[in-house]
Image (spheres, rainbow, N blue to C red):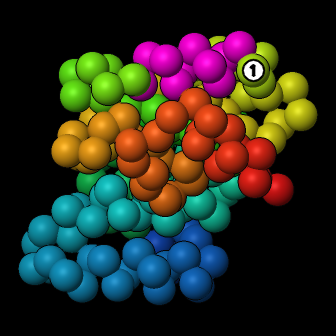
Amino acid sequence: MSFRNAPLAVEHDVDKSELFKPEIREAIDAHIAKYPPEWKQSAVMPALSIVQDANGGWLTTELMDDVAAYLDMPAVSVYEVATFYGMYDLEPQGRHKVCVCNSISCMLNGSEELIEHVEHKYGVKVGETTADGRFTLKEVECLGACRDAPAVLLDKVYHEKLTPEALDKLIDGLE
C-alpha cells in the first residue's frame, strides 16, 4: 500500500452523509457523540474499526479517505493511525485473524513457540493467510495481558495462558 500520491486532505463533492451506509454512519456517530464537537477526530480509531469490519476485515485507501472526510481531518492523519496500530489491515485477510502477542512477557512464556507451532502445523508464516483463506497469522506488539501470558487474540476474543495444543483447539474450531 503506497500513500506517496495520497492527498493531505480529502475534499469530496459528495455530502458526508452519503459516504457510508446508514448503519455505518450511525455506529461512527455513536462514537463521535462521546467527544466534544471540536474533538470528533478522536473517534478515528473506532471509525476505522467499524469501516474495516464492514469491508471484510481490511481498509482501502478510499475507505480511509472517506473516514477522513467524515471526521473532517486530513487523510494523512487517518493513514498514520491505520499504519501505526496492528489491529488495522491494509490488505485482504483470512476469514479469521490469529494474533499472537510478542511482548517480552509473552515471549518469555511461550509466544515464540506458539508462532513456530502454527507456522509448522498450518503451513503459514507470520503475515500470511492460509491457502484455504481460513485465517491470517499475525504477530502483534502487546495485547495487554502480561499477567496471563502468552496471549492470543482470535478475531476479537482474547485467550491467555495458551499452549500449542490449546491454540490448536481454538484454530480447529474456526469455521
Q: Position of residue 154 (x, y in %)?
A: 55, 49
Residue at x 89% of width, y 34% of height: 132
> Residue 113 or 41: which is nearer the viewer?
113
Magenta highlight range: 111-120
Left or right of 69 on screen, residue 52: right
SS at mark 1 in the image:
helix
Tag 1 residue: 121
The location of residue 145, given as percent across then percent down, is: 26, 46
Say which residue appears at 65% left-offset and 49% top-offset: 170
Relative to 97, is 122 on the left or the right? right
Residue 63 left/right relative to 121: left
Asked whether 91 falls inside the magenta stretch, the response is: no
Quarter placement of the N terminus: top right
Between 138 and 35, the one lying in front of the other is 138
Magenta part, dominant SS = helix
Q: Is residue 89 depicted above or below 118 in this figure?
A: below
